Image (cartoon, rainbow, N blue to C red):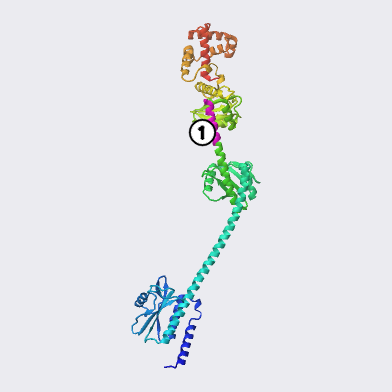
Amino acid sequence: MAPPAAAHDSLLRRCLTLFRGFDGVGGQDEAEILRSAMAQVSAVGAGRAEAGYLRLGDALVRCPHDGARATEALDAQVRELAGRDGPVRFPRRAWGWAFGLREPGGAEQPGGAEQPDGLRGALVVSHRDRPGEDERLLLGMLVRQTAAALATAAAHRRERVQALELRRARDEREAIRRRLDSSLTDLGQLREVHDALARSAAHGDGEDGIVRTLHRITGLAAAAEDRFGNLRAWAGPGRPDPYPKPDPAHHEELLREAARRPRPVRVRDRLLAVADPRGEVLGALFLLDPEGRADERAVRALDHAATSLGLELAHLRDLAEVELRLRRELVDDLLAGADDSSAYARSEAVGHDLHGPHHVIAVRWTDRPADEVFLKSVSRAATGLGLRILPALRSDTAVLVAQGAPGERSLHSALSRELGTDSGAIGVGGCCDTPHEVPRSYQEALRALEVRRRAHRAYGMTFFDDLGLYRILRTGNDHREVERFVREWLGPLMDYDAVHRTDLVETLTQYFDRGGNYSETAAALVIHRSTLRYRLQRIREISGSDLADVDSRLNLQVATRIWKIMRSGPE
């Protein structure tokens, strides 16, 4: 047995060897530290390391795998100890022990808790013979050194994770800062565009103001079109003259495709944005950019301006619809009978002056339904003639309350060109100087329209003031009585003319129109006076009427007047 001094020196040398075995473990991970500790067991004494375990979650997992001695039976014994120090059994080995690897300051839980505080793993050692006190002391030092190294490695790992997270957080913060700076720049640019457009709107500049603002901000020529490709406003150089008209089908498809895009699209030398505030395309706004100079700022300005244009166009359409509704309601009330003061105030609100002479015009067309399209056509034709009108639809008729009256046949000709057919009739009522007279003019217009439609020449324009005798006849079924009256007095002559192709009814009409003057009547008919006398004699014989009798003469004259209107319409 070695003397005490020699034994102490031997123990000290073995401790130094043990500590040198852990030099530089700070850079190792837990598995490498455990592997180094297992290698140092043989330096402690005659024992050997059987297995090492690391804590993973709530379980101890063998690490590393090191041959047949580390068996599943050993794993089961270590699990039963649950991290506590305790004996384990090995075949043909007198002593085996599992050391819990705990952080410095860690201790087993009171009452044998399943997981001691600070547990990092376990080291299993065996001896052929029971180890001495010095050897157990060194094993204890090795266990503590290993546990400290594992704690340090875990701390380093946490520091690395934290450092990585901090670096990631700094990177994310920097990215957020860059995005925020970019957003602030974008916001400033949009604010500039918004303020400029708001100032334009405040001044009531409308579409022209939007386009001028866009041109001023971007430095590029800008233009606004309606949904059909017609130019509404232009700002900047390069305006084409005349402005090209696009192919309707191609232009409609282009706008539909552009409306599906979230940003303005390039179409050849243009950047195009669609104005569709309610999902309905109302127009388009574009920048002329043949050299491709438009940057992101210009694209955002165009997009924002297109939104403003859409709101402006929607506002204008709403105003137009409201004004149209107010106009039609006013016309309905005027035709039904409105008091003058209310009518004047309401007409002024819709921009129409009811003071002065007005005429009611009633229009029907044979091959056109009386719908909104027809009313717009009638309105365009009337305004094209310089008439200021209030339009409305009543039943199957387009009705206009017009300031002044259309010239002879002018409205029918203009509307025929507008509709592409002349198969329609127009009735014009008498003049009304105040609003409460409008219902009377309306009834007169309907009367004139009916007379024209029942005339031999049913298409054309008839003025109530030219109806003559028809002005005293009511509308409705009275025309049958009128026709019977004409037939009663002129029937034999009309039948004779139809069979023999003569002009006895026309001769009698010309005779009455000229007050019974033979010379003027013969000249109008381009016949000799003797021929006229012969015809008048034949008229007396065929009709059985005496032209010298006052009553017969009056009835025949009235009948010829009506026959003339029925045959050709009022002249």
On the image, the x and y values in percent for residue 312 come to: 58, 42
Relative to 552, residue 435 above or below: below
Kindly give the residue lying farthest to the right in the view shown. Answer: 237
Q: Is the N terminus in the top left, top right, bottom left or bottom right quadrant?
A: bottom left
Q: Which of 409 and 536 is in front in this view?
A: 409
Relative to 516, residue 430 above or below: below
Using a 10 Å C-alpha cutoff, classify the residue at mark 1 as few (fewer than 14 neighbours), some (14 to 19) or many (20 or more): few
Type of amino acid under label 1:
Glu
Q: Which of 1 and 470 is in front in this view?
A: 1
Relative placement, left or right, of 431 versus 118 is: right
Q: Is the C terminus in the top left, top right, bottom left or bottom right quadrant?
A: top right
Q: Which of 367 and 171 is in front in this view?
A: 171
Quarter of the image for residue 229 reads top right
Instruction: Say whether residue 309 is magenta.
Output: no
Magenta part of the chain = 321-336
Q: Is the magenta stretch mostly helix, strand or loop?
A: helix
Can residue 228 be spotted in the picture?
no
Relative to 342, residue 171 above or below: below
On the image, the x and y values in percent for residue 163 come to: 53, 69
Relative placement, left or right, of 235 versus 130 is: right
Q: Which residue was labeled with disc 1?
A: 372
